Amino acid sequence: MVDRSDNPGVWFPPPLWYALAILIGVLLDRRWPLPIAAGLLSTIGGVCLVGWMALTFASIGRFRHSKTSIVPIRPAEALVVSGPYHYTRNPMYVSLALLTIACGLFLAMWWPIVLLVPTLAIVQQFVILPEERYLRRRFGTEYEAYAHRVRRWL
């Protein structure tokens, strides 16, 4: 059993950063519209939405299979390295980026997509880096080897 107080120290739920990008994007679009021209928006948005669902469900499934929590304020019981984690160390954050892009496309506005750039920087600084420090401390050389062979994003 892992000490419950041993966690990455990420207290702001990561999906809320992406939700804020969408919400602020909608608000900015009301004041300074940045519309996206019609065309393949729904197709590209649909592809992003399917990608979001596939990565999210596969990632959550891997966590459940490994009997560890996806909640970053809880301790990690296992290091998840299979499924989408074989290709990226952060498939859930990649999936949320796809969802943010899909929302921008479905809303036909650039702002959520533009705000995704600072959102990814914030997530990397305040979520991913603390999680990585924690995983290094928790799993040592096993995590180091994993981080060496799998990219942080894509």
Image (cartoon, helix red, strand yellow):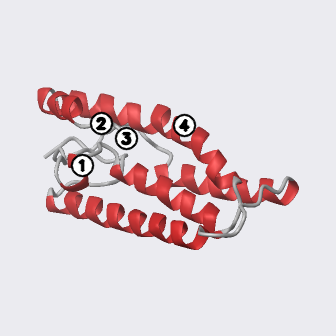
Q: Give the mark, 4 or 1, whose residue is nearer the N terminus.
A: 1
Relative image position of residue 73 (x, y in whole percent) = 37, 46
Relative image position of residue 123 (x, y in whole percent) = 49, 40
In the rendered view, does 66 fall on the left or right side of 25? left
Disc 4 to disc 1, C-alpha distance: 21 Å
Disc 2 to disc 4, C-alpha distance: 18 Å
Q: Residue at x 53, y 72 (%)?
A: 43
Q: Are marks 2 and 3 in contact (CB under 8 Å)?
A: yes
- For badge 1, the amino acid type reads Tyr
Label 3: how many Cα within 10 Å (few below 14, some 14–19, many 20+): few
In the rendered view, does 67 fall on the left or right side of 110? left
- For badge 2, the amino acid type reads Arg
Find residue 124 and name its label.
none
Q: Give the mark, 2 or 4, whose residue is nearer the N terminus.
A: 4
Find residue 153 and name its label.
3
* Residue matched to label 1: 85
Q: Residue at x 31, y 48 (%)?
A: 74
Q: Secondary structure at mark 3?
A: loop
Q: Are marks 2 and 4 in contact (CB under 8 Å)?
A: no
Q: Give the mark, 1 or 2, whose residue is nearer the N terminus.
A: 1
Q: Secondary structure at mark 2?
A: loop
- For badge 3, the amino acid type reads Trp
Q: Residue at x 58, y 73 (%)?
A: 42
* Residue matched to label 4: 122
Nearer the observer, disc 2 or disc 4?
2
Q: Are marks 4 and 3 in contact (CB under 8 Å)?
A: no
Quadrant, the C terminus: top left
